[in-house]
Image: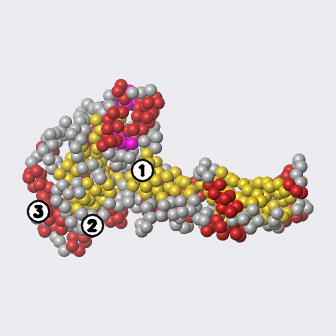
Amino acid sequence: MIWNKVRECESVEKRKERQLADLKDLCSRVYGRVPFYKKKFDEAGIKPSDIKTLDDIAKIPFTTKDEMRDTYPYGLLAVDETDIVEIHTSSGTTGTPVVDAYTQADMEMWGEVMARCFGMSGGDKGDVVQNAYGYGMFTGGLGVHYGAHKMGANIIPAASGNTKRQLMLMRDFKSTILTCTPSYALCMYEEAKEMGIDFKDLHLKSGIFGAEPWSDNMRQEIQEKLHLKAHDIYGLTEIIGPGVSNECENQNGLHVNEDYFYPEIIDPATGKVLPEGEKGELVFTTLSKQGTPVLRYRTRDITWLWHDKCSCGRTLVKMHRLLGRNDDMLIIRGVNVFPSQIENVLMRVEETQPHYQIIVDRGLTHLDEVELQVEVEETFFSDETKELERIKNKLHHELKQELGVSINIKLVEPKSIERSIGKAKRVIDKRTL
Amino acid sequence: MKVRQISVFLENKNGRLAEVTKLLGSNGINLRAVSIADTADFGILRLICDQPEKALKLFHDNNFTAKETDVIGVIVEDKPGGLSHVMEICFKNNVNIEYLYSSLMTEENKAVEIFKVEDIDHGLDILAKNNVKTIGKF
């Protein structure tokens, strides 16, 4: 099903006209209403009226995650506070979050783009959507929820966890579309096996999986085990949440809802816009978002963009499945984790900077597991096991508080973590995606 | 008198103990008492030896995390009830024991009990008042 044939299948020229009109409007809106952006424009020596073509977007300075944090809570607001109807924040950290504030129009737009994603994934009115993304401040759960509502599907807001109940609901309410992280999908398979449930006997036809990195190998595995067609979805709190792009039935690139989220690929080193087809950092501008519009947000995600004649009929530009990131951010069970956060906790607990290494792997349950290896230094070594156990437990607790994910702590002997010349190798990611 | 104990952090890895004892032996250090406290993924080796300073330096030079701690050494008769008498005194006088291990002094038919208490000076004081003989070296 194509949710919005007019917009999704229109000619590239026509879309560009709309994008340009929206971009101009966006620039004058934020210049007039958001001091943060006015300052950016002024410092770059440009006025909204300087944006005459889509290519002129390159004149506008980038926005970074740090800047979005620095403007917490309402520094990027482009409407009156009373016009905001919902707030979401970035996941995971207890540090200053990134805020997404939605007006009623933004909520409509979010539902629209998510409904399109459902359409791309073979969904339609009459489907039963089992939503196993986390609900709450995290955009994943509610974003999917609004899209399913917009489409007119029956939605089961199961949220993440409680796998036995998930499977029971899936069986009894004959869920046809599953939405969750890809690793949780495989986790469900394991649990189903134990419960004696065969996915062949269930009614799932499609899955919309995202919020963490995965690969075509993992897709094959999920499709075989869960007997459904697995689609990749992409989104981020800074832009809207889920719904930025999604794979169609061809499973060959994610169609970007570019009439709302204007994508660019830049050279991360120079900031120069790269031509279509070249690999680089993905940058987004929210063309029509009202509450907290974002201009040229640097996602740090590495991919490339291309147009092709997709047999699904959509003319929306495609982005390749993410190839990686150009910073050291890790995505653990859908939560963003920076090694620097782990360092801060170590510093706080030990009052020292021990040598450490983070090892990420997928365990038997297929869920991300993180082990933090910390070299035991004299400053906190004790002749009593209970003292070392206390430090371990404290680290575990503080990391859970800070990151929102559980990390196993392993105390190791000094010099047992490999030293590398220059920048220390802090992260070993063994996840075979 | 206090006994100088060296404790060493060890990961639970095959052959680790063999390496440590070899290191001490090949450097002429004689062990008098040894114990290991183990957890799921690491252990703490505690030892009393004839040359604590040399042993500590050796460990540091070989990238081990090691430290010195003062513990109490008590000589008890190698017979039933030998340890019980000392423990009774500790218990009655609120001397809390963190851990304890033993070494036998075969030639004198006596045993040495090594233990760590919360407050070593208080512990030594109580033992002295109760005529329990402590040692510094053995």
- Residue topped by disc 2: A269
Q: Position of residue B96 (x, y in %)?
A: 77, 57
Circle 3 chain: A
Mark with earlier residue (3, 2): 3
User: Which residue is at 28% across, 56% downward?
Assistant: A302
**Label 2: which secondary element:** loop
Badge 1: few (under 14), some or many (20 or more) residues near its Cα, within 10 Å? Answer: few
Residue A187 lies in quadrant: top left
List the single residue furthest toward the front.
B26
Q: Is residue A351 left or right of residue A48?
A: right
Q: CA distance from mark 1 to mark 2?
A: 27 Å
Q: CA distance from mark 3 to mark 1?
A: 45 Å
In this view, the mark in front (3 or 1): 1
- Residue topped by disc 1: A430
Badge 2: few (under 14), some or many (20 or more) residues near its Cα, within 10 Å? Answer: few
Q: Position of residue A104 (x, y in %)?
A: 26, 50
